[in-house]
Amino acid sequence: MGDLQLEAIYKDFPSHRVVDGISLTIPQGCFYSLLGPSGCGKTTTLRMIAGFDEPDRGLIRLGGRTLNGLRPYERPVTTVFQSYALFPHLTAAENIAFGLKRKGDPDTARKVKEALDLVQLSAKADRLPAKMSGGERQRTALARALVLQPEVLLLDEPLSALDPKLRKQMRLELKELQARVGITFLFITHDQEEALSLSDRIAVMNQGRLEQIGTPQEIYLAPATRFVAGFLGAVNWVGAIGVRPEMTRISREAPGNGARVVEATVSSAMFLGDCFQVETKTPAGDSIIAQIAHGIGEFQRGERVHVWWHPGDEMAIPQ
Amino acid sequence: MKQRLLPLYVVCLYAFLHLPLMILCAFSFNSSRFTVWEGFSLVWYQAMWNDGALAEATWNSLLIAVVSTVLATIVGTLGAYGLWKRNSKILSGSLYLSLVTPEIITGIALLATFQWAFRYFQLQLGMHTVILAHVTFSIAYVLLVVMARLRTADPALEEAALDLGATEWQAFRLVTLPMLKPGIAAAALLAFTVSFDDYVITSLVAGVDSETLPMMLYAMARRGANPVVSAISTVIFVGLGILIVASERLQKA
Amino acid sequence: MMRLRALFLLPAWAFTLLLFLAPLLIIVVYSLQTKGVYGGVVEPWTLENYTRLFDPLYGVILFRSFLMAGVSTLGCIVLAFPLALYIARSGTRKTLLLNLVMLPFWTSFLVRTYAWMFLLRDTGLVNSVLLALGVIAEPLPLLYNDWAVIVGLIYGYLPFAVLPLYSNLERLDKSLLEAAADLGAKPWEAMLHVVLPLTAPGMRAAGVLVFIPCLGAYLTPDLLGGGKSMMIGNLVQNQFTSARDWPFGSALSLALMLIVMLLLWALLRRDGEEVL
């Protein structure tokens, strides 16, 4: 048991470099997310930790033990695959028992039962994957990986195959499950909302490199790069200063002291249901979007307004 | 270890598949009658060339193969189109069954049928019975290949043609048939090789005037070692190879 | 629309009815009649041709046919499986490797069989080489026995086993193998517990596709078995030529046909049409 450490990992594919010098430490028991757009190298990183691919350079360590060169079946980590990769010829219980049987675990039956209970699938133990719902498949895959009590559980976009409503529900379950089992979770995703809501820590990746590591708040509120700022949410850029639309205010009168103010003209106003989205143009040609709550009033196209925000909400990012 | 063992195995299996034919071809150029290499020679090819009966059998085989290929391709293509429009389980089932029926059974059943029919008509076994037999067993092959092509076709194309004022015949002729061309060519090639190669059925329904190349080859092979058979085999091997390569080229062009 | 279709199906119907279904019907009729003194088929109607199928004299040949076809089928699947696995995993070279498997298949079956006679006969290449090397003093009797026939059948029908196994293995989700390894299965365990069970449909298809032509084989046992290694096909041919016992030959044919249809029916019922 211990922290999972990646030390200067590189991986080249024939056409390009996929992972370009990644170093990070994933503390034991942490819910850690690797967030980035598709093709950023996050899945390859996961595959190298699982042992499906070997890094060209760099070390992968788990609690001081080096994992490099170990076959996937020799590593104390397990994976929940994006497609779940459930064995179609085996029932839920048999899928969960698969790994225990390989180890010749004498306690297989009890552990399978517990794992089924853990993910609330006891009633579906004898179902084949083809007869399961998306959520049931997902839980089977989770139980199958957790039952081996790995030191790290790797989750490769495990929620992406579910419909949006189920995805939100599984998000909660996943968070609870991690708290209960206390195993390190390494969660791979391209969905910033998922990463923000689930993680203790997030590492943002782009083009094979780490952009920033931090808590969800740090990443969202104090992004280190323009990429991170933009990937986690919409940003209004005024020179080197960025501010998120939901922190941008609009008023007809000039705001009080201390606020940063820009005068602008309303170019469009849209009703989004939970808020209004007002787009404005500054004389300098910047476009600034503000999301404002109901009750603040409606703005007309062409109206001249004051756009402002609190200096504390600014994100200053060196270009 | 596995990384090296499997490729080695694969090489051995390909050798098993290809070496027997290559060795046979190589020894057709041997000057000796025996399987000891004595030097390069074309003597067996000369013997083959000068054999009048062999030339006649080859001519018969080519004639039978061409005529039955043309007929089977037409019947099979039209049939595939008809079945594509609406399947008839009895017809397609029978055709597929004919594909897995042991040749010897097809042969004796046809023989029995021809004999029975000849009681009422003054006819004998000959080229016509061989051709009829070959068309019958080739139809299923043509059907199988053309059907595979039709399965990828979009029925909406014909509907569009009808919608734009084409008759059913024009829709078939101007829209579907051009799309099927590569499939039909492949089907014809298959029908040709199956017909040209057939021995079992042919030998049962052939008459005195219709000895084919496979029938002669069979008789020579049974009689014992004969380098002429190796020479003929090489020619067939190369000839069919050229035919296949040429048809691939034509289909691509 | 329907009139054109009917017209198009007419020739195919005609050939199928007159030259496939009617001949089978004639065989059914013949199988229920009696052999004439000079070979023809005469009355009375009888079931005796069918009861003769169980005569030990023929039973031996039937049993041998099943055994040889079974051994050949098993051989084909065992040989083809690793090859199919290799091809399924070889990326862009798949087409080339598959074409190489099919290539001998486009050559004349007779030529392919003759190639083995050329290799295996007493004065054939194998014996010549072994004699020249001094490994043996006298030629080994390699040709004209059951093993020669089995080699010929395996050689002839190996592609029928490679293709269904390949398409099955090709469709196999690669992440299942990774999942197995991830869960602690060594490569041979993944093969045994994941790949083999999931390729069972391919094996059944390969088994039926090879067994059917092997069971009905005529040319291979005739040329490579040299009359010593008779199979059902040769027995049928015998009844229609030298023995001139058409009724019994017909009964034999129908029995063989029935087995073929049953095998195919069982396969299609279990795995659906997609397996072929």
Image (spheres, rainbow, N blue to C red):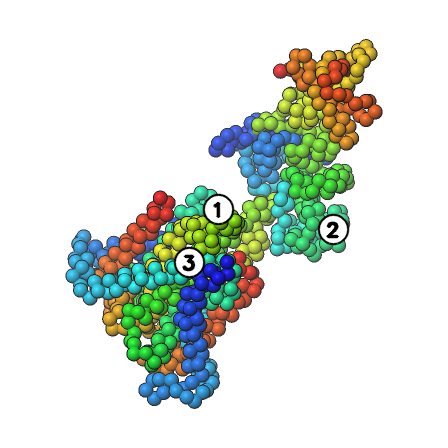
Look at 44% across and 67% down and name the residue there: C13
The disc numbered 3 marks a residue on which chain?
A: B
The residue at 66%/24% (across/down) is: A230
Q: CA distance from mark 1 to mark 3?
A: 35 Å
Which element carries disc 2, helix, strand or loop? loop
Look at label 3 and name its amino acid: Thr
Residue A175 lies left or right of residue B195; in this view the side is right
- Looking at this view, name the residue that lies furthest to the front: B165
- Is A112 placed above or below B71 here? above
* Alpha carbon separation for disc pair 1 and 2: 36 Å
Q: Nearer the viewer, residue C243 or A236?
A: A236
* Residue C130 point in image, percent of width and height: 28, 59
Give, as a three-letter code, the residue at label 2. Answer: Leu
Q: In the rendered view, does B248 fall on the left or right side of A69?
A: left
Answer left or right for C109 relative to A285.
left
The residue under label 3 is: B77
The circle drawn on residue B200 is none
Please give the name of the residue rendered at 45% of the width and 79% of the height, measured from the top-left corner: C28
In the picture, the quarter occupied by the C terminus of chain B is top left
Q: Is residue C62 visible?
A: no
Which secondary structure lies at badge 1?
loop
| Residue that badge 1 annotates | C89
Give the distance between the C-alpha atoms of the residues marked 3 and 2, in whole angstroms: 54 Å
Q: Is residue A100 visible?
A: yes
Residue C275, horizontal then vertical, whole percent:
52, 58
| Vertical side of A283 occupied by C31: above or below | below
Dots 3, 2 in contact, CB < 8 A: no
Residue at mark 2 = A121
Q: Residue at x 52, y 49 (%)?
A: B163
